[in-house]
Amino acid sequence: MGHCPESHIDSGSMDTAAVEVVDLVKRYGATTAVTGLTFTARKGAVTALLGPNGAGKTSTIEICEGFRGADGGRVRVLGLDPVADAGSLKPRVGVMPQSGGVPTGARTGEWLRLMASFHARPISPDLLLERLGLTASAATPFRRLSGGQQQRLSLACAVVGRPELVFLDEPTAGLDPQARMATWDLVEALRAAGVAVILSTHHMEEAERLADHVVIIDHGTAVASGTPAELTGGQREIRFFTDTPLETSALAEALPAGTTVSSSTSGGRHHHTLSTPGSPGSELLATVTAWCASADVLPEDLRVHRRTLEDVFLELTGRELRNR
């Protein structure tokens, strides 16, 4: 989409915390949704909060936004209490809800201009409409926008006031690839301008692309945190599938010490993963193909796979479906 010249925001020192959450607790009756959660989100950085449904992400974000009170722990947003100091924080914080928030009859351009009028130094609404591909829909009522267009308008409303901190909840849900890339470009422009971005998403590629820091939450607490590179460890694996099962123990014996072999079956195919302490080299690939040839087995889609954030997420939170 190109550089947005008016997307820069004066946000003060970039080495200070924008959000500090320490030992946060939130209860709903007998259910504890958040249990001793601690993390820090810094200015000029994208912090991704990841977790399965029901993990406590929404409660945490709503507390940081000042919409809910905490039952324990300490939360500070731009150095202030998000509930007691809500009036002071509102002009400084942008919030993009996952859905809703705009009257159904409001026209796209008029609504964004109204939101801009509430701020002292807004970004040009016309510029944001262009950047997010909404110029042609400026006169269209909100109810007639597609789901993706509604998402983009919500994003525009969240950032039009040049916030120091912005909360984005599933910002690219339902977007086509072009709109997703435009949204990612805008988030990266916000970060470059010194804005703190807290991103909640189920899209692991999005988190891996955008996040400087990732916090994985499960059952109300942080089960892992770090940069995407720290969490994935840069580990690589060899993956392939076969139409017939393998004698994995025999394959493991033919491989260098420390190499592990795991297999699973789905869709009538047998999927195999080889993990090594370091990066797999050409010698290991040659060993695998030679062993398969000797066993009269064809390894299909043989490739070196880099461990991703999604792999880490599933390892930490489980692969089973949840009711929430």
Image (spheres, grey):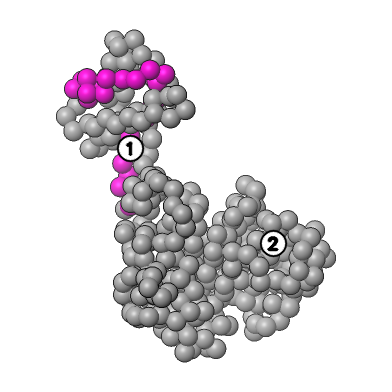
Q: Residue at x 30, y 11 (%)?
A: 295
Q: Is mark 1 on a helix, strand or loop?
A: strand
- The residue pinned by badge 1 equals 236
Q: Where is residue 269 in the image (x, y as percent from the top left)?
A: 43, 24
Instruction: Tell me the mark number nearer the camera, choosing from 2 and 1.
Output: 2
Query: Which amino acid, mark 2?
Result: Gln
Q: What element carries label 2?
A: helix
Residue projecting furthest to the right: 139
Residue projecting furthest to the left: 257
Q: What range is drawn magenta here?
A: 231-254
Q: Position of residue 87 (x, y in %)?
A: 55, 88
| Left or right, residue 308 beside residue 253 | right
| Left or right, residue 136 beside residue 157 | right
Q: Residues within 10 Å of mark 2 (few under 14, many from 20)?
A: many
> Is 247 one of the magenta-colored residues?
yes
- The residue pinned by badge 2 equals 150
Query: Which amino acid, mark 1?
Result: Arg
Identify whether 26 is placed above or below 5.
below
